[in-house]
Amino acid sequence: MEDRDLVAAMIGRDPRGLELAYRRYAGPLYAYSVALLADPHAAADIVHDTFVLASSRVRQLRDPDLLRPWLYAIARNECRRAVRARRRTATLDLAGDPAAEEPDPETAVRTAQAGELVRAAVASLGSGDRTVIELALRHHLSAVDVGAALGIATNHAHARLSRARAQFERALDALLIARARGADCPALRQVLGEWPGRLTPLLRKRVNRHIDVCDSCRPRGGRPLTASAVVAAYTAGVLPAEQRRCAAATGPSLKDHLSAAPR
């Protein structure tokens, strides 16, 4: 069934529509939510809530071919709501901000070393570029779908994707050079200070500026690693075992929701 067929089934209250949509997109949505929240249990809840909301709002989807980015948009909004709730709880408990933790979607990588490199590079980007890279590079959304997921025009999505990809490659440059040359170049060592091996957005910009003017640190013969070279390592994750058994857990609750929803 095409996505538009799934949408038609969901509108018609055919439980197969929601079930097939869940089977098709629950895994990627789970990986996306883990990357945003750094909490597998919360991410599993987000996936469940995403499909509950989708079933109740499916008539609001104007273009049934855009089911996939629409689901990502719902999941993204639910993750943002969860982060806001965390912040309120953290403030009351005088705890740190959990949103500042670096996402560690270990189930989303094929090679641990490459996966760690990509995660570290993504973590050094600004929040806007991180969002676009997450959707486009890891989840393979087109510029059209990225625009639909973020609620922006396609030409704007193209521009943001181009910028985000360039910034991601610059982040890879900075990370690789910092790790390879940090002990050898005095000027770079001064820039890095007591860095823990991970770059913040500000430190990444400083390292990039240093690379631009330092003959010994500037990559020769092109970039040491490009975004396209690490795409395979930055693949979508999978639902944990208990979530894959949705027929015994999540599935019934979704079906119950459908049967109870107004027609």
Image (cartoon, grey):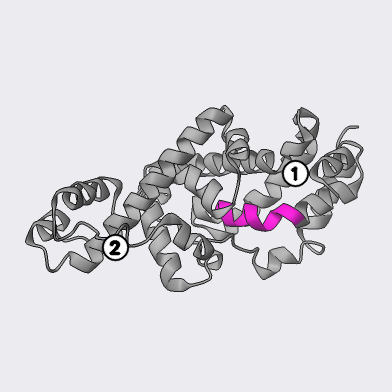
Main secondary structure type of the part rendered in magenta? helix
User: What is the quadrant of the C terminus in the image?
Assistant: top right
Residue located 43% across and 68% down the image: 114
Quadrant of the rendered structure where residue 252 is? bottom right
- Work out whether residue 223 can be spotted: yes
Percent position (x, y) of residue 90?
Answer: 41, 46
Q: Disc 1 versus disc 2: distance between alpha carbons?
A: 43 Å
Secondary structure found at label 1: helix
Q: Nearer the viewer, mark 1 or mark 2?
A: 2
| 260 is within the stretch colored magenta | no
The region drawn magenta spans: 24-33
Disc 1 to disc 2: CB gap under 8 Å: no
Q: Which residue is mark 2?
A: 176
Mark carried by residue 52 = 1
| 25 is within the stretch colored magenta | yes
- Work out whether residue 42 can be spotted: no
